Amino acid sequence: MKSPQNKKIKRLLIANRAEIAVRVIRTCRELGITAIAVYSEPDRTALHILLADEAYPLGGVTAAESYLNQHRILDIARQADVDAIHPGYGFLSENADFAEAVRAAGIVFIGPSAAAMRLLGDKTAARKIARQCGVPTIAGTEDALRSENEGIKQAQRIGFPVLLKAAGGGGGKGMRVVSSAADFGAAFTTAQSEAKSAFGDGRVYLEKYIEQPRHVEIQILADRFGNTIYLGERECSIQRRHQKVLEESPSPIITPELRREMGEAAVKVAKVANYSNAGTVEFLVDLKKNFYFLEVNTRLQVEHPVTEAITGLDLVKEQISIAEGEKLQKTQEGIELSGHALECRIYAEDPQSQFFPSTGRLERYDVPSGPRVRVDSGFRCGDTVSVYYDPLLAKVITWGNERGGSIAAMQRALSEFRIEGVKTTIPFCQFVLGNENFQRGDFDTHFVRDQFDEKDLFQSNKLEQIAAAVGAMLALRDNQPHRNGSTNAHSDNLWKRQREESYR
């Protein structure tokens, strides 16, 4: 195969699935790049397979058997004679060994170097770099914990409550808040197990748990020539189980001065690690607007569309261009932020049952559209949501000249989204958008704990159940012949109105 340095990419394999695979395929299509998909057995008829130019079976059912199977993915890459591999997010996207193996095979890895990934993708190593750069960090352990006993001693030194976090990945996997020594053992075991399952790396570390924090992250782009820029911030404080549900850009609390200070800190960390490609530097911001380095995600983020919406950039296109050896087309002075963007993640989860995953066949799946609305999805009507992978169905992104406009556009878009067959987080997102504290921009990462009660969704669900029962009765009646041979238009319209009300 050709050298992976400085060449145009013509054939690209996406080592991922669902909406992020679809997202990468669409940019490939615009660039004239042949998009090659891979799939597990449950994904045999998935949307990303249908949209790709070519598709190859990974075999297996679980993530470990399929999308985490490095050897199989590399075998397919050789078989398909690809120039590059895009890892998406999750799975192998932050696995330095995989990035190294891809490049050793003469294939372009669309992401940072393995060395930079080891420095910054490893959460404990990244904290050391941030401290060396003079970037504020949260008190915590320098290295991964070797045992439960060591963890308890360190937690007592730092002071409870503490946060257990996976060293080898993000996305809320392997993360647990621990309030006392008595709770540490169970949390430690669970965090290790979850981290191992999600990233193939069971190491965890500790940091002090900050009360009432905002989760704010900076998107960066860096080329191979030392040029690094930041593209504003994303507010990611609306979370459940430490995983984001709703993101926006810009943040309601970040001033231009603080944005510049955080952006420059993010660039400083990236430069020290000789980082190239897209990445995200995450911070916690306290009540006094002091910020603390959290971690670096050495990949494309789930919430990247809100940055695209306010900058006009295609971040996947930028990733490919950087991987081809091109210089950044934009300088820091050339970055202009326009308007306000919002993203709601639509998960197949039941917000009335502690966001427990909901599986089943999508009997109906109608996505919203219209002005200022974008939907990134990897599912269609008739697809099955399985237990094997992340339950993210779609991301709805809206844009407005100001924050109120993007919120109004999102409320309209979610009212149009129709999903039947599984429970979803749409009702929860609608609750957030209508919450007065959220509308004022007054919230933190404890929003779900402090503001949300599962009973808040009870009334709307009751309306939906009543509407469904009415619909079933009308369907039975309409199957019977009428005396005059016509349908009952008045009753049909009544059902439609009741159904529409159930989604509001």
Image (spheres, helix red, strand yellow):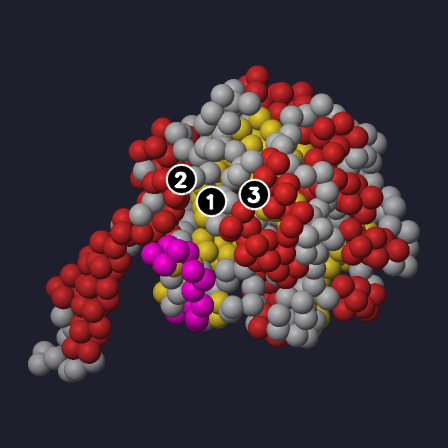
Q: CA distance from mark 3 to mark 1?
A: 15 Å
Region of the chain picked out in magenta, as a range = 351-363
Element at label 1: strand
| Amino acid bearing label 3 | Leu
Task: Identify whether 278 is placed above or below 73.
Answer: above
User: Which residue is located at x 74 percent, y 53 percent?
Assistant: 95
On whether residue 360 falls in the magenta region, the answer is yes
Element at label 3: strand
Give neighbour class at mark 3: few <14, some 14-19, many 20+ (Cα, 10 Å). many
User: Which residue is located at x 47 percent, y 44 percent?
Assistant: 239
Which one is earlier in the sequence, the residue at label 2 or at label 1? 1
Which one is earlier in the sequence, the residue at label 2 or at label 3? 3
Which one is earlier in the sequence, the residue at label 3 or at label 1? 3
What residue is shown with label 2?
A: 447
Task: Look at the numbered discs 2 and 1 and tell me whether their residues touch, using CB distance below 8 Å.
Answer: yes
Is 445 in front, or is 66? 445
| Amino acid bearing label 1 | Gln
